Amino acid sequence: MTVSLSRSFPIETGIDLDFRPSSYVADWCATAAAVQNIVGEERRERVHQRLAAGGLRAPMPERLLADHLTATLRDRVGSLDPARNISGEYLPPYEPGENEIARVVLGTTPRLVYSLRAWTRMLPGKRPHFGKSTRRTGEDHKVYRLVGEGGVRFTIPSPWSVGVLSVRELIQLIDRAQAPHLDDVPKHLPFSEALVWWRAQNEHDGRALQRFVRVSSVVYPELGAFYRQRLRWWVAGRLARSSDCMRFADALDRAMEGWWQRAR
């Protein structure tokens, strides 16, 4: 199902919610493959820019392409410009065979980075939360975890599936994520909107709030456009209804719930 502009949920760009990649390895282009597991947000951006400008003609420093920097190099790079260079660099190491499939970047200083990761595990047959149910042992299961810096812990209800997720299923997985620092946020809010609500307690600039959460993926290229449009719509509607930002006016949240029911 392709989502397009509508009065109830105005996504300006058509997005195929049923798109399902063949795997979680972002090998569909050289740039995606190069940046997929680089944890540092600044390094990812620099590699992307250099490749987009024809950077394959000359080798890039190994430190730019490394998934993780050594502790010594990380401290050295961070000391040059902590506000830019440390974002994402303190994310936990990857498990064997694990890949990042999406990331959430917050507009703090320095930027906070949350990484959604997936790996394959052969599990006894169960009924998965996403994908077709199965009772066969040895099935190809994908296991998910959302990690952050500084020991922050996230909870993802039913964090596994049979096979890779569609765009729709990935959005639902992200939307259901929970974190202790969001305990005071209304429980019905999806994860990205909950983060904006949390920020809105101290930030009342509507444009800044619309840009505060950025979701992206090199495996699902349309994911960023989906969240960008949804957050703009949600924040603009909230601000239009209340000078106190996001403390009440749940009508828009109910509208979003209704849209999801129709989109499934």
Image: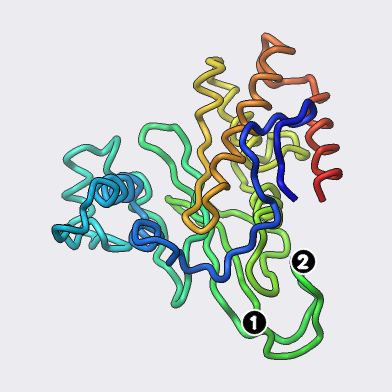
- How is the model colour-coded? rainbow
Residue 5 in which image quadrant: top right
**Residue drawn 37% across the image and 32% down it:** 109
78 relative to 97, above or below: above
Residue 12 in which image quadrant: top right
Give SS at disc 2.
Answer: loop
Front residue of 75/128: it is 128
For residue 44, the mark is none
Q: Could you say where residue 71 lies in the image, as x and y percent from the top left?
A: 24, 59
Give SS at disc 1.
Answer: strand
Q: Residues within 10 Å of mark 1 (few under 14, many from 20)?
A: some
Q: Could you say where residue 222 lies in the image, as x and y percent from the top left?
A: 56, 47
**Residue drawn 18% across the image and 62% down it:** 62
Q: Residues within 10 Å of mark 2 (few under 14, many from 20)?
A: some
131 relative to 59, above or below: below
**Residue drawn 57% across the image and 70% down it:** 22
61 relative to 139, above or below: above
Q: In the image, what residue type sits under mark 2?
A: His
Q: In the image, what residue type sits under mark 1?
A: Asp
Work out how far the residue at label 1 is from the one at label 2, CA to CA, in angstroms: 14 Å
137 relative to 100, above or below: below
Pointers 1 and 2 in contact (C-beta within 8 Å): no
Q: How many marks?
A: 2
Q: Could you say where residue 58 lies in the image, as x and y percent from the top left?
A: 14, 58
Front residue of 3/162: it is 3
**Residue drawn 43% across the image and 32% down it:** 108
Q: Tell me the residue that label 1 is attached to.
A: 140
Q: Could you say where residue 253 lies in the image, as x and y percent from the top left?
A: 78, 30
| Comes first in the chain, label 1 or label 2 | 2
Say which of marks 1 and 2 sits in front: 1
Left or right, 137 with respect to 54, comes to right
Q: Tell me the residue that label 2 is attached to.
A: 129
